[in-house]
Image (tube, grey):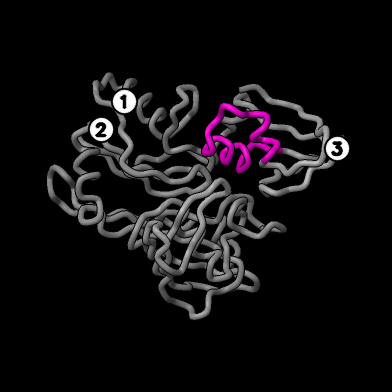
Amino acid sequence: MKTLEIEVKEPIKLLELIEEVFPDSSRTKHKEILAHRVIIASRHITQYDFPLAAGMKVTIEGDENRNKPMRGNMPIVYEDKYLFVVNKPVGLLSSSTHPDDRTVISELNNYLMQRRSRQRAHVVHRLDRDTSGLLLVAKTKDVARAFEKDWKERVYDRAYVAVTWGAPVPASGMVKSWLTENEYGVVSSPTDNGGKLAITHYKTLRKQGRFALVQMQLETGRRNQIRVHMREIGHPLLKDPIYGYRDDNSPIDRLALHAFRLYFKHPVTEKDVRLETPFPDEFMTLFSK
């Protein structure tokens, strides 16, 4: 896909324009374009119902701009004969169906090929492109299947840290809801509406002015769970283009979410593997006073 410059012919909402321009693309693709590729008047716009007037110019970035330099390299924090754990940087996809995309999987496959290994990287779980942190990747399909078969018991502690707008009240607690997806993203319901049950435990670690540093642990692992739940209690993450504030004058230029802890029972050796990373410097500078 090449970069497109579109002149709006008549009033229309942004997502509707994307659907018209890409009629053969999936809903997921439309949402990906909305979240990352739209520029209007030199600003990235992610608001699905952003009103477009006749004569406005809309730029939809193409693949030549898609693989912008990621922030930092991708340290391998754990490796054995069976699997990797990497510290995924912001801006890198976990995996992709597009062979030209740079992803965690493609980076690790290049690493394996350079070592003349016959193994290949296999997805075990995912982090959003704009989320950083610990990501588990198998070296064989059998190891990946072992995690998939018994994920909840095998991966027994996943913790994240985030910076939120304002401090949650109470300072610690649990958010429980049922999540469903529509064309605009993930929607939360406090009662069972046929969606997937999602439970997030949170604890406020620090407060400073408009911001709070909050730790989250997942009892369930649903798509965008943390981002949706923090918005639900009135404290969305900084720089969240979909579930955050529309006027987000954040002092940091990234989604404020990092997966810092990953504890699991190894599917082959059955040993406990416990890994943690430091909180991102970008987060901690907000709490240094």
Residue 38 vertical placement versus 170 (above, below): above
The majority secondary structure of the magenta stretch comes to helix
Q: Who is closer to the viewer here, 220 or 134?
A: 220
For the C terminus, the quadrant is bottom right
Residue 157 image point, x, y percent: 29, 59
The residue stretch that appears in magenta: 16-38
Residue with the mark numbered 3: 54
Residue with the mark numbered 1: 112
Q: From this viewpoint, which residue is outermost toward the right?
A: 55
Residue 95 image point, x, y percent: 42, 34
The numbered mark, 2 or 3, whose residue comes first in the sequence reads 3
Q: Who is closer to the viewer here, 66 or 282?
A: 66
Judge depth for marks 1 and 3 and give the one in front: 3
Alpha-carbon distance for marks 1 and 3?
51 Å
For the N terminus, the quadrant is top right
Residue with the mark numbered 2: 139
Residue 202 vertical placement versus 126 (above, below): below
Residue under the point 58% across and 56% down: 243
- What amino acid type is highlighted by mark number 3? Ala
Q: Residues within 10 Å of mark 2 (few under 14, many from 20)?
A: many
Residue under the point 73% across and 38% down: 39
Q: Residues within 10 Å of mark 1 (few under 14, many from 20)?
A: some
Residue 22 image point, x, y percent: 62, 29
- Kindly check if marks 1 and 2 are in contact, taking CB atoms under 8 A apart as contact: yes
Q: Who is closer to the viewer here, 72 or 139?
A: 139
